[in-house]
Every structure is written in C-alpha cells, then in structure tokens.
Image (cartoon, rainbow, N blue to C red):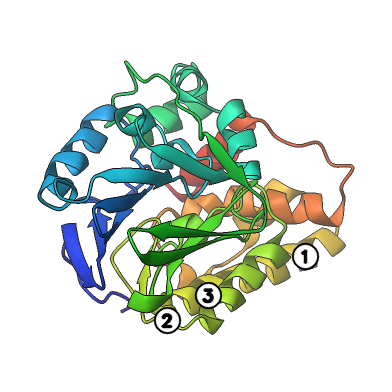
Amino acid sequence: MTSVTSRTGRIALGGGCHAWIAGDTGWGMSNAGLITGRRASLLVDTLYDLPLTRAMLDALAPLTGAAPIATVVNTHGNGDHWFGNQLVAHAEIVAARGSVTDMRQVGPAETRALSGLDTPAGTFARRIFGRFDHTGIEPVLPSRLFDGECVLDVGGTEVRLVDVGPAHSAGDTIVHVPRARVVYTGDIVFAGATPIVWHGPFARWLAACDLLLGLDADTVVPGHGPVTTKRAVREIRDYLAFVHEQASARFTAGMPAQDAARDIRLGRFAALDESERLGVNVHTVYRELDPTLPALDGPGLFGRMADLCHAAG
C-alpha cells in the first residue's frame, strides 16, 4: 500500500500545507492543494467542473478567510486541473509555458465534442466523464508563464515550481514546499492508478521521478489518489520503465502498436486502476522509436483505450 491516509476532502499536512483529495476515484477525479502563509494563500490546481471547484473553495474558506488565495498554480494543461479557473480569476494564475499550449488545444468545448461522438471513443468518453458538468465553463488561462523553475513567496513561505515536462503532458509542474517537506506532483504521480503518457518522452517522466525521489520531502500529494509517500513515485517509475521495455521489444519485432498493447501482460501492475491507458502509453513509445508515425488526435487516443476495454471485457 502506498497511501499515508485514505481520508478525502481537506487534509492538513503541516507547515501551512493542505491537500484537497477527491472523494471518489477514476478519470477526472483530481486532487488539489492549498499553501497558506501570512495573509495569503496559493492554490494548487482547480478541478474538472465548476460544482466540484466551488465545493472545494467553500471547504477551504475557513483557511482562506484570513489568507485569501492570491496565487493559483495549474500543474498542467489537462482540464481536470484547470477548468475551474474562472472561480479564482481574481488571483494571479501561474503555469509552465507548455501547459498553456495544451490548454489552448483542448478546452471545455473539445471535451464536450469528444463525449458527443457516435463512436467507440465517444462512448468511452461518456462513460468516464459523464459524472462531470462541463456547461458554463469560461476558459481562464494562466496570466503568468514560466520556463524551467520559479520561486514564489506565499506570505513568507517559499514555494518552488519546477517544470519537469514534457512528460505526462507538454508541461508538468511540481510544487515543492521545502520548509514543510511537502511536494504536490500534479499528474507525474498517480497513486493506485495507471499513469498515462499523453506527450512523453518516457525519459523525461523517469527523470521527473528521479527528481522527486531526490527531494527532501516526506509527503507526496499526487494528481490522483490518496496522499502518499515516495513509494508511490517508485511504483510509477517502475511501471513506466516496464511498459517502455515491453513496447520497445514488440516494436523491434514488427508488431503494430495496438496489437502490442493487447499482447502486453502487466503482471504486478495489472491491479492499477484504468489499465486501458496502456493503449496510449504504447502508442507514445512507438512514436518515440519512429517519429514518422502520425500522432493521434483525442478521438484516436480514446479509441485506442476503448479498444482495450472491449478486448478485456
């Protein structure tokens, strides 16, 4: 087991750090965080729709009343980490440059369009995203971009932002609070679930795991799943190395990518939730090994996962 606590909702971590842990699991049920200083707070990520984000902000109000949210950091450009930005538009919103590129490419309209397709990809998207309400969302993009690293002062508390992407996505920010020995990882860490390599390369994600393992941090707040420790980072690293090795061997043998995804046996990683993400991960390995392979759009990627679900079902 990797979890420190199975509790959900607002969790105090010490040193002015708090986690907001989703009360359910699965696609789109993301975590967030709050770092409080003297008379100011920093919010790590908003959530996948307005009702979820509003409920979180209401639950955080006892903390933010005396330390209002002055800064928001979006860890990356997947909608479940920024679609609620309009509810904190008064704050300075910070993100890595690559994250904004992703936000511009896939926003609420594109998400709704995917779920409306009369295809296996659309059916799969409706099944995993049907719990969310994507109406009424006005995309609010970050107002401050950074490259590489950035250090913020949150009411006297030092907060380090490090862009470890492209990896999971085009930009992946980890948020480290050295004094509290806490790190918010965004989707570089999924605790108890399968990571998905939308962008890659795998080597960047493996390097990001190594960076996390080298940090002076005891508490890890993942993008999805319970508050955890570095053990979860090692598990993600092991999964990524395993999939890259298995997919590379099948690429060398001339096996098509989707056949390879069906052929790979996940062994000790089979118990991770959302195992169908293997379809995307194998495709990403194949494109690394042969950059002439065409990229898949959203429907194409979700179609790969829908195919694996059908094969498994």
Per the rendering, the mark at residue 231 is: 2
Identity of the residue drawn at 64% across and 35% down: 101
- Badge 3 marks a residue whose secondary structure is helix
Identity of the residue drawn at 31% across and 55% down: 33
Residue under label 1: 248
Residue 109: x, y in percent? 48, 18
Give the mark, 3 or 1, whose residue is nearer the N terminus.
Answer: 3
Q: Is residue 31 visible?
A: no
Identity of the residue drawn at 89% across and 42% down: 292
175 sits to left or right of 304: left
Residue at mark 2 to residue at mark 1: CA–CA distance: 26 Å
Residue under label 3: 212
Q: Is residue 82 visible?
A: yes
Label 3: how many Cα within 10 Å (few below 14, some 14–19, many 20+): many
Give the mark, 2 or 3, whose residue is nearer the N terminus.
Answer: 3
Looking at the picture, tell me which residue is in the foreground, 180 or 306.
180
Label 1: how many Cα within 10 Å (few below 14, some 14–19, many 20+): many
Q: Is residue 133 above or below residue 241?
A: above
Check if mark 2's residue and mark 1's residue have beta carbons within 8 Å: no
**Eye-nearest disc, 2 or 3:** 3
Looking at the picture, tell me which residue is in the foreground, 23 or 244.
23
Q: Quadrant of residue 298?
A: top right
**Eye-nearest disc, 2 or 1:** 2
Residue 260: x, y in percent? 69, 56
- Badge 2 marks a residue whose secondary structure is helix
Residue at mark 2 to residue at mark 3: CA–CA distance: 11 Å
Tell me the quadrant of the picture where the N terminus can be found. Answer: bottom left
Residue at mark 3 to residue at mark 1: CA–CA distance: 26 Å
Q: Kindly identify the amino acid type of the residue bearing the numbered disc 2.
A: Arg
